[in-house]
Image: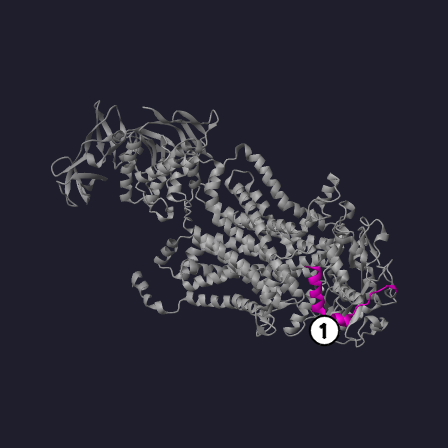
Amino acid sequence: MDVTSARRAWLPRRYALDVRHALLLITGLFFFVIILYPLGHVLYRSLVSNGLLSLANYRAVFLTPANYRALWNSIWVSTCSTVIAMAVGTLLALLVVRTDIPCKSFLKILLLLPYGIPPFIGAIAWTQLFGPAGYISKLYTALTGAGQVPWNVYSPGGVVLVLAVYQFPVVFITVSGALGRIDTTLEEAARIAGAGLVRTMWDITVPLVTPAILAGSLLAFVGCISNFGIPALLGFRSRFFVLTTRIYSALSIPNIPLATAMSVVLTGVSAAALVFQRRLEKGQQKYTLIAGKSVNPQTINLRGWRMPVLMATISIAFFLSVTPIVSMLITSVLNYWGAPLSLASMTLDHYKYIARLDMVRRAFANSLFLGIASATITMAVGTFVSYMSVRGKLRSAAILDLLGTVPYALPCTVIAIAMILTWSRGPVVLYGTIWVMLAAYLVRYMPFSIRTTNATLKQVHPSLEEAARVSGAGWLQGMRDVVLPLTKPGLIAGWILVFMPAFRELTMSILLWSQGTETIGVAIYNMQDAGYTQIAAALSTIVLLVILAGNILVRRLSRGRIGL
Amino acid sequence: MQERIRVNHLSRKFGTVLAVDDVSFEIREHEFFSLLGPSGCGKTTTLRCIAGLEQPTAGEVYIGGVLVTSVADGVLVPPDKRAIGMVFQNYAVWPHMTVEQNISYPLKLARAPREEVKQRTDKVLEMLQLRGLGKRYPAELSGGQQQRVALGRALVTNPEVLLLDEPLSNLDAKLREQMRFELKDLQEKTGIAILYVTHDQIEAMAMSDRVAVMNNGIIVQEGKPHEIYQRPANKFVADFIGTMNFLQCQAIESHGDSVKVRLQSGDVVDVGYQGSIRGKCLLAVRPEDVVLSRESGLRCQVEVGIFLGSFTEYRVRVGNDALRVQTSIGAQFQPGETAFLQIEKGLLFQ
Amino acid sequence: MRKTWVFVAVFLLLMAVSTSGMAQTRVLLYTSVPLELATKFADEFMKQYSDVKVEVYRAGSTDVINKIWAEHEAGGVKADLIWLADAASYYTFKQKGLLQPYKSPEASYIPEGVKDPEGYFTGARIINMIIGINTNLVKDRSTVKGWDDLLRLGSKAAMANPLYSGSNFMVTAAFVKKQGGWAWFEKARKNGVLVLRGNSDVARGLAAGEYAAAMVLDYMVYELRQKGAPVDIVWPEDGAVSIASPIAITSNSKNPAGAKLFIDFLLSKRGQELMVRDGVIPVRPDVQPPSGMPTADKIKMIPIPFEWAAEHTAEIRETFERIVLQ
């Protein structure tokens, strides 16, 4: 029998249940159990008041001044932070990617450092710098002789700025990615047409990466609006509340129905942002024909400006990344917080204490497990779903794709509440185990993986895989021999993008942990919460070192292709 | 006639590789000048140096008599101040602007009054048969239309110099032929000096007033298309331009304007040649310079024939050498048949 | 391919590590006592009873209470021991059957006022809500004497949030009951007294000089003073709020024997002496308080209406939220 007729013999099997359909079904069930069912719980609880279906809880959200003010605060604070993050992130991406500024990789690492620090630790570091008794505030009053500093971190403005600091790397990452892929002849054509450097950037480059800027900004917006640590630390004192901190208060009272209703509203706001962004993206799709075969990426010659621009960028990067870390380091060796900076008040006791703690060891093991497990599972599921919707163009897969992206709009607090409501009662009780945390992590990071796998798969031309199929490879084999090897770098990068934030996750863990399932984030938070700022700082320093070391390791292994 | 582009001793090094090695040429008004060569020969780099998109490591460039690049004097006018038009290989039509916006963009940058912008854009749209497409986005256009938009954008400011970087290579055959005529027409109409970079020798031959053949960063021959075709300066040019048969041979006798050579089959042929040549050499013969008959000449074996419309091309074997020969419609040969060939014209290379 | 297997192996190993970790006999303690203190205590206990492993879950009072209720609803509280500052919630726990009684032999040394007559819970340490001052910022001690002086200081004074801190919840209940209303808190809101999250935050800011004075727990100020911070304790002339942070065994305890050992140790002379080292006033009259601190019976107190607070928990919290936090 020759090859052709051997292959033809398989044709009549088209009605047999395909592996892909079975996998789709399983994935669908998985998504239902892990995403839809818990969300349904939240929605249901928010609609029940005194055992009856009613909108009373929502009335409480929109008619109680404290609640609707918090909603409004959430919106304007997040918008302001997003605008700042967008401007700073885009500008820095342009500088680092599209000019001949020296020390690019160093600058990149410097600018992405804030991404490696848990935001609330960063927020603490900023208060240590700019708080009423902060290092910089003290310096300022000493230098100027003024009795008081003219700023106040414990204010809405402080919340906006610190949120922006922790969200600009997101914009930076997405925009620099898009800039790297742009067809540089488009810019050259503008130069030939008579446009100067700045004009070319403004007329050509920026519009072309606008979808990326918007996508990054949306991420930043959702990040801001769902952040709890920063507004809690900086807003509480001036009685400035946002939705997340109000939800927390409602949980403390405890007023679960109100908490769930506010959660649904919060979800609504971020979902609206998501829909808005999709709209914009669609409107722009008509011109997103960025050519695949980009030639040698040309950088803009800064000439005489090279050094001044480098200095300015380095100072900004240093200020945003290194100063909080330094302040964290100083704090970690201080006797007590706010102690005068002298050798006499320095100690390594906090590090010694950490070394003795069982809990810290457990926390590292748990975080490692949760990080690896959630990154691996989400990437596997995400790859499959993206593949089926991008390539297979299957409608059911497209629905799964959308469903998997829904948690994008879900603030961490809401996910955690959903998990508590769902898994602490009923047939399967997971609450109090590490599995409920894993479930929450999976929900949280699924959209990240679907987004990256979508983008990665789109870069592999279908003809490559079709060539494998025509050569006689089955679906699974074509996937294994052609698609996966080609997408491997992208997939590994996506894995790391999930692992890093999962490794230091706090917002969900803090609501879900129990004895034995502590995570790094929880350990740090508890230390901070119990008043051991120095121990928390010491632990954060160690975590940061671990993340940096891991990053260097990954860069080595991947020969510089992956990692920050 | 006025000189529009002059390139003096231009070199460009990438690391240790010399991509462009001491290249000099000039292009005059109304001239269609092609840089022809295989990929990687340095032609695009030369073009980009002229456009100011690339910095040469040595040499000078003048555009319209003005020094725009000089490594020695430290002159480097940025591309936006060179007043040139350029069409990129992939057109580089801005996807976020409409056809009209694309074309009028250079005028806007030049701060032309609104009426003038409108008028000239319309004129270009008209000239390039893009009327009615002004409000469309590039993604809604065909390849040929996008190409014309790129051309329109390059021409709208009436530059004195137009640089074309393989602009036809992404088009299908039919469209490519049509565009060739359009480009020639355009040059007639505008008198613009065109620098055309291509690897397609037929295109270069068909359109150029002068051609410079490049290889390994060096211009190996420069001249009118028919000169280059008829008198290639070396084996590389002979091989690269048109179809050429190469036969190993031995020069045995020189007669001032002709040389007797012995082919590997043992046959002896007379070839026109100026100067003296001895020992081993290479005989280059164009397929159309061979006459195939049943009467007289070198004995050969017909292997296969391809009918090409106005002529038929055969592959024949003389001893161990294979040759491509063209015959007019008249004579027909069958594969396996024994025939005779006469070499009417040939070139000898040492 | 080999890398994949290594990866899978590491993955499985981590799963094993994170799900195992079972000890000999285990006592699980849910507490709001600062972690360092709680673990130090557990360590000392385990030195003496090496076959019992004490594991500590520490969070703010409110978080712990919420967790307890969640677990209770989900099928039973996991902890063996509960040790919180919010004494009022023990009345609710007792009423809802979450606790089991235990009369420790050591409890006989402890005054009646700080233990449940039926033995459901026993006060284990005396923590006092006092006024802490930053000595750099308060030059004239006579200006900060009583609770009303905090109101005068306005945004130069701070307190913790009773929605989070159990001790502050007690204080709020005590103030409201004593004054028959929310006047003090209304004024605090009007003058802009800062409300932070927990007492540790308050103590930290006080040491750093972010404000001049604060309503804060005594032992935290004591500890900071020991470390050299410019802080001091002022016993308010109108009375401190003294909380006998109780410990209790849950009715669901899997290891009541171990839990009882821990309580015995905690209430023993040695246990109380350990606490004194960290600046905490002991519940036993036969143990000397930390130097410079009064014995429990010498403290002028504002009484805490435990049962009233337990009954009106949600109402008190909501009112505080409305008056002070909005």
Out of A151 and B146, give the one closest to the viewer. Answer: A151
Residue that appears at 31% across and 64% down: A8
Question: Residue under circle 1?
Answer: C93
Q: Which amino acid type is marked by label 1?
A: Phe
Residue A51 on the magenta span: no
**Helix, strand or loop at disc 1?**
helix
Q: Is residue C319 magenta?
A: yes
Say which residue appears at 52% left-offset and 33% top-offset: A303
The answer to whether residue B274 shows anywhere in this view is: yes
The relative height of residue A366 versus residue B9 in the rendered view (above or below) is below
Q: Which residues are magenta?
A: C298-326
Name the magenta segment's main secondary structure. helix
For image coordinates 25% across by 32% down, the residue present is B283
Observer-nearest of B343 and C123: C123
Q: Could you tell whether A38 is left or right of C243 in the image? A: left
Which chain letter matches label 1?
C
Q: Position of residue C233 (x, y in %)?
A: 83, 56
Quadrant placement of the N terminus of chain A: bottom left
**Residue C140: percent from left, percent from top:** 85, 50
Farthest residue, direction top: B256
Vertical placement of B125 versus C186: above or below? Answer: above
Residue A12 in picture, x, y percent from top left: 32, 68
Q: Quadrant of residue A343?
A: top right
Question: Which residue does the image show at 53% across and 49% down from the upper left?
Answer: A173
* Residue A16 figure quarter: bottom left
